[in-house]
Amino acid sequence: MILNNIFSANGVSSISEWFKQLWEGLVSLFVSGQFPEGNYVVTSFLGKLVIALCVAVPLYIIVKVIVKLATLKKKNISPSTKTYRNFIISVSKVFSYCIIAILFLSILGLDLSGLSTIISSAVVAIGLSLQDIISNFASGVIIITSKRYLTGDYISLNGNEVEGTVRDIRILDTKLLTPNNIEVSVPNSILVSGKVSNFNVMKYRRIDLTASVTYGVDIDAIKKILLYCVNTQEGVNKDMSITVFVRSFSASSIDFGVRCYVPTSIYWDVTWSLNEKIYEELVARKVDIPYNQLDVHIVKDSKVAKPITSDIKDSDVKVASQPVSADIDRNDGNDKILDNLLDNFEKSSANLVSKIKTGKKKKKSTK
């Protein structure tokens, strides 16, 4: 009753009439692009809000449904297609939400003529404060276009600083799943500027192992054993290069290198299995495997020092009553020199006095 009075005061006879005008306005909006003149719904802010919601909410739901359908897992999809799809979906979703927001504000009757000026000013201000975000976005575009890596590739950054399987390439960052089952988000700018190693680009990957044996073995025999291990190992590509060589001479062992190629997908499985096979073959053929050891030499008939006896009595040994000071007086040398000068002066003066006295006595006697 109250609502009917409110609508009647504004030129609408009832709620049903108000919804009828709302429906006519929506139909006219989508058919001719404008509301019919004289429609009360257009002049009411409440009506504009309802219309804006009626337009924005369905569009938002449609975008969500499209994104959901586009991100459904599909069989027989290539990694490159999946990477492009995820990136395009994330970018399109952001732009769609921006368009819906602008449409919502325009239906409310807000003046958007100065929106371009506001947006340009905001872009400059945001560009200065969000340089990293813009850099990450541009780097994401570079990653997608250059195909440095794709979803599902195993990569490492800057010498295994960060490594893992690429799960998703997004607008600003890339998600990696580490071997420890930890999800790591790496900014795209770091992946573009850093050194990225992609282990899935090539179909085959080389295994490089080291087998150490003691000195004195037959080198050719060890090579044959290692070649046998590689040739009988399941997963090794026999058509590609297989190499066994002497890698180096260590302190206590001869180090042999073993190289062969296996499919990238089973690299680690073949590596671990080949290590076990080499060890079992060396042990079965009684080849000594060196390890760090310490050689202890025992000297036989060693001479033991006999106790020393002395017939010197304690009374014959003079012991100083006071300990000798270890401190050295820097003035000791100067004092000794001064004492010597004084002694010499006294002796010379005494001789001079005695000569004078003897001279006087001789003069008296002559007189």
Image (tube, helix red, strand yellow):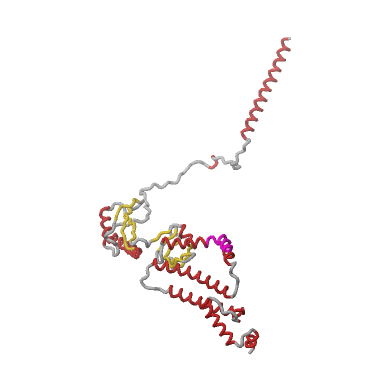
Q: Which residue in the rendered view is the most extreme toward the bottom?
A: 1
Whether residue 105 appears in magenta in the rendering, the answer is no
Q: Quick one: 328 or 83, which is closer to the camera?
A: 83
Highlighted range, magenta: 120-133
Q: Nearer the viewer, residue 258 or 136?
A: 136
- The residue sitting at the front extreme is 37
Give the x, y percent position of residue 358: 69, 16
Above or below 149: residue 27: below
> Seen in the image, is 355 located left or right of residue 197?
right
Residue 83: image quadrant is bottom left
Q: Is residue 232 left or right of residue 19?
A: left
Q: Quadrant of the N terminus?
A: bottom right
**Left or right: residue 307 compared with residue 111:** left
Nearest the viewer among 71 and 267 is 71
Viewer-closest of 141 and 38? 38
Give how far across and how far down residue 191 sits, in percent.
Answer: 46, 60
Q: Quadrant of residue 45?
A: bottom right
Vertical placement of 293 versus 117: above or below? above
Residue 283, placed above or below residue 340: below
The residue at the point 59 percent across, 81 percent down is 39
Q: Is residue 324 left or right of residue 226?
A: right
Residue 143 figure quarter: bottom left
Q: Quick one: quadrant of the C terminus?
A: top right
Name the dominant secondary structure of the magenta segment.
helix
Residue found at x 31% / y 52% = 246
Residue at the far top: name it.
367
x and y percentages locating residue 287 in the rendered image: 29, 57
Q: How many marks?
A: 0
Q: Position of residue 197 (x, y in %)?
A: 41, 59
Indicate yes or no whether the magenta region holds residue 122. Answer: yes
